[in-house]
Image: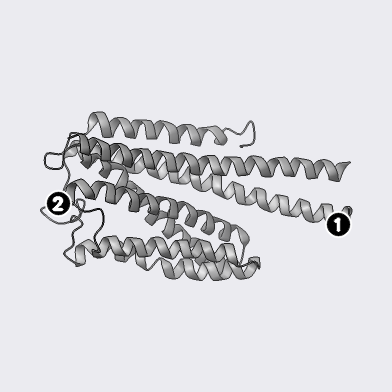
């Protein structure tokens, strides 16, 4: 029985971690690009 | 990072979060424990929707690639590439959660049966699609070549789906629309369809986020060109 719970835990843990990391990765990239865009806009205006 | 003040920027993430929370409740509280496999059968509720999302994502790649080849507009290429990335993520999850479920039930992590092998081929095809996009520098050539791969690669999706109907395999026969001896307990079916809906909402959310990233990259490229024109080195 314990083995079954272990397998269930790992399956769900991997799914959630993968989705979370994927979302985090997109979010961090978006933030970095938006920062660069803001800097370039500043350079263009000034 | 979403633009402030846009209601769509928080409605979809909130809907995704709530539907996922409800799906978890349906899986672990509402759905009964299966008699022969026991608690490990609950992997089914996220394993099958992951496969559904992978199929849906690759169908989107197929569709958007055709539209790109017809219209040659970059937005269709962005949609196709974003969809492929999400599809690869969910196809990877299918290939990971499948063996985790198979080991206690079949006694082996992996077997070269038709469905498993064709799913692995599907994953490799779209990993190849992403590698192609990474290595081809010319944007137009990249979009055209990857559109062709995206269209041809989709041939494997119906093969994966039909493999358990065409051949006798280690993988279980279809539980939905698989003939007179197939079917799910009504409570299990309710939990399953909740998960399917939650994963579909998640797919839309991930796709929109990924497309937004592409748009930001384009905006950045445009600004960099303008800066180079106005501030030459």
Q: Is residue B57 left or right of residue B3?
A: left
Tag of residue B8: none
- Secondary structure found at label 1: helix
Q: Chain of mark 1?
A: B
Q: Could you say where residue B61 lies in the image, as x and y percent from the top left?
A: 47, 60
Instruction: Name the residue located 30 percent from the left edge and 64 percent from the top edge.
Output: B117
- What is the number of callouts on the image? 2
Mark earlier in primary sequence (1, 2): 2
Location of residue A5 (image quadrant) = top left
Residue under label 2, please give it: B182
What secondary structure is found at the residue carrying circle 2? Answer: loop
Query: Is B84 left or right of A30, judged from the image as shown?
Result: left
Q: Is residue B45 left or right of residue A39?
A: left
Which image quadrant: the N terminus of chain B?
A: top right
* Camera-nearest residue between A40 and B111: B111
Residue B100 appears in the rendering: yes
The answer to whether mark 1 and mark 2 are in CB contact below 8 A is no
To the question of a shared chain for discs 1 and 2, the answer is yes
User: Which label sits on residue B229?
Assistant: 1
> Which corner quadrant holds the C terminus of chain B?
bottom right
């Amino acid at each position: 029985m314990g083995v079954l719970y272990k397998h269930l835990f790992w399956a769900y843990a991997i799914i959630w971690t993968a989705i979370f990391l994927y979302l985090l990765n997109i979010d961090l990239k978006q933030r970095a690009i938006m920062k660069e865009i803001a800097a370039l806009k500043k350079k263009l205006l000034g | 990072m979403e633009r402030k003040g846009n209601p769509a920027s928080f409605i979809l993430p909130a809907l995704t979060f709530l539907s996922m929370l409800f799906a978890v409740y349906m899986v672990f509280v509402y759905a009964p424990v299966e008699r022969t496999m026991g608690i490990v059968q609950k992997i089914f509720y996220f394993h099958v929707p992951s496969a559904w999302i992978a199929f849906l994502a690759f169908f989107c790649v197929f569709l958007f690639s055709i539209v790109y080849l017809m219209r040659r507009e970059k937005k269709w290429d962005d949609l196709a590439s974003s969809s492929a990335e999400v599809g690869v993520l969910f196809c990877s999850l299918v290939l990971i959660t499948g063996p985790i479920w198979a080991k206690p039930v079949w006694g082996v992590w992996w077997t070269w049966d038709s469905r498993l092998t064709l799913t692995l081929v599907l994953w490799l095809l779209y990993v190849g699609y992403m590698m192609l996009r990474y290595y081809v520098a010319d944007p137009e050539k990249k979009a055209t070549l990857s559109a062709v791969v995206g269209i041809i690669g989709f041939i494997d999706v119906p093969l994966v789906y039909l493999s358990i109907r065409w051949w006798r395999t280690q993988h279980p026969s279809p539980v939905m629309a698989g003939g007179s001896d197939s079917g799910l307990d009504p409570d299990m079916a309710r939990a399953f369809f909740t998960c399917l809906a939650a994963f579909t909402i998640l797919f839309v959310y991930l796709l929109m986020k990924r497309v937004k990233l592409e748009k930001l990259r384009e905006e950045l490229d445009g600004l960099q060109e303008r800066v180079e024109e106005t501030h030459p080195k």
